Each structure stands twice: as C-alpha cells, then as structure tokens.
C-alpha cells in the first residue's frame, strides 16, 4: 500500500472518530468535547489533503466518505445500540463494496 493510501486510510479512521465526537459537544456548548471535535476535524482535513497528493481526489473522496459512512453506522450499531435492518446492512455492504472497488481500480 502506498503512502497516499495509508494516509487516506488514516483520514478515514479519524473521520469516524470525528463523527463520534460530535454528540458529546452538545451543540458545542461543552468546551473539552468541542475542542476534541475541532482537533479531529482539523486532523481529518490535514490527512486528506496529504493523501490527495498521490491518490486522485475523485477516488480519495469516494473512499474517504465511504469509510466515514460505513464506520459511523457500524459504531452506531456497536456503541449506541442503533437498530439494524436488512436495508441498513445492505447499505453498509454496498458502501464497503464501492470502497473496495474504488481502491482496486484506482490509478495510484
């Protein structure tokens, strides 16, 4: 795996953490959770900006948003006991398949 793809993977993981850091801010009324949320947001942007130096932006953004969406759903199921349906499971599988296809067919 190239450095660009490694950075993209890191950006996706931080994106998932960032999404989970939003609710504890309670509308950005709590200082420390808000500071963590903003720091994760900046880290995501930085990592993604480094990744697109070598991974085409169209591919990078599809993979990045797919990882974030699937990760948010999976963590919602695991940590917040969100309800699962066949349609939601199919959506996550389609997202994962799309991410894998985008990676497999990427130029970089």
Image (tube, helix red, strand yellow):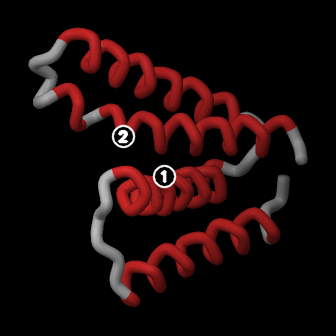
Q: What x and y, as percent, mark residue 18?
A: 41, 34
The residue at the far right in this view is 1
Give the residue drawn at x 64%, y 51%.
Answer: 60
Classify mark 1: residues with Cα within 10 Å, few (<14), some (14-19) or many (20+).
many
Q: 62 left or right of 104?
A: left
* Mark drawn on residue 7: none
> Cα distance, mark 1 to mark 2?
10 Å
When the figure is inspected, residue 35 is found, relative to residue 22, above or below; the finding is: above
Number of numbered callouts drawn? 2
Front residue (pair 59, 95): 95
**Residue at screen point 43% across, 57% down:** 78
Do the numbered discs 1 and 2 sit on residues whose CB atoms are within 8 Å? Answer: no
Q: Which percent across, then down, holds residue 38?
A: 34, 20
Q: Position of residue 79 (x, y in %)?
A: 38, 51
Left or right: 34 in relation to 64: left
The dot on residue 68 is 1
Q: What residue is at 81 percent from the left and 69 percent from the top? A: 104
| Residue 24, quarter of picture | top left
Q: Which of labels 1 and 2 is toward the front?
A: 2
On the picture, is 23 further left or further right than 49?
left
State the image quarter where residue 107 is shown. Answer: bottom right
Residue 13: x and y in percent read 58, 41
Question: Mark 1: which secondary structure?
Answer: helix
SS at mark 2 in the image: helix
Above or below, comparing residue 68 to residue 98 in the picture = above
The residue identified by callout 2 is 20
How many other residues sit within 10 Å of disc 2, few (<14), some (14-19) or many (≥20)? some
| First of labels 1, 2 by sequence position | 2
Q: Nearer the viewer, residue 63 or 20?
A: 20
């Amino acid at each position: 795996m190239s450095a660009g793809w490694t950075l993209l993977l890191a950006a996706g993981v931080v994106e998932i953490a960032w999404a989970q850091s939003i609710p504890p801010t309670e509308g950005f009324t709590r200082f420390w959770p808000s500071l963590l949320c903003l720091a994760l947001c900046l880290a995501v942007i930085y990592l993604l900006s480094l990744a697109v130096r070598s991974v085409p932006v169209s591919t990078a953004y599809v993979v990045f948003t797919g990882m974030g969406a699937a990760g948010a759903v999976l963590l919602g199921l695991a940590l917040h006991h969100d309800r699962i349906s066949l349609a939601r499971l199919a959506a996550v599988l389609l997202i994962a398949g799309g991410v894998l296809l985008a990676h497999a067919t990427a130029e970089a």
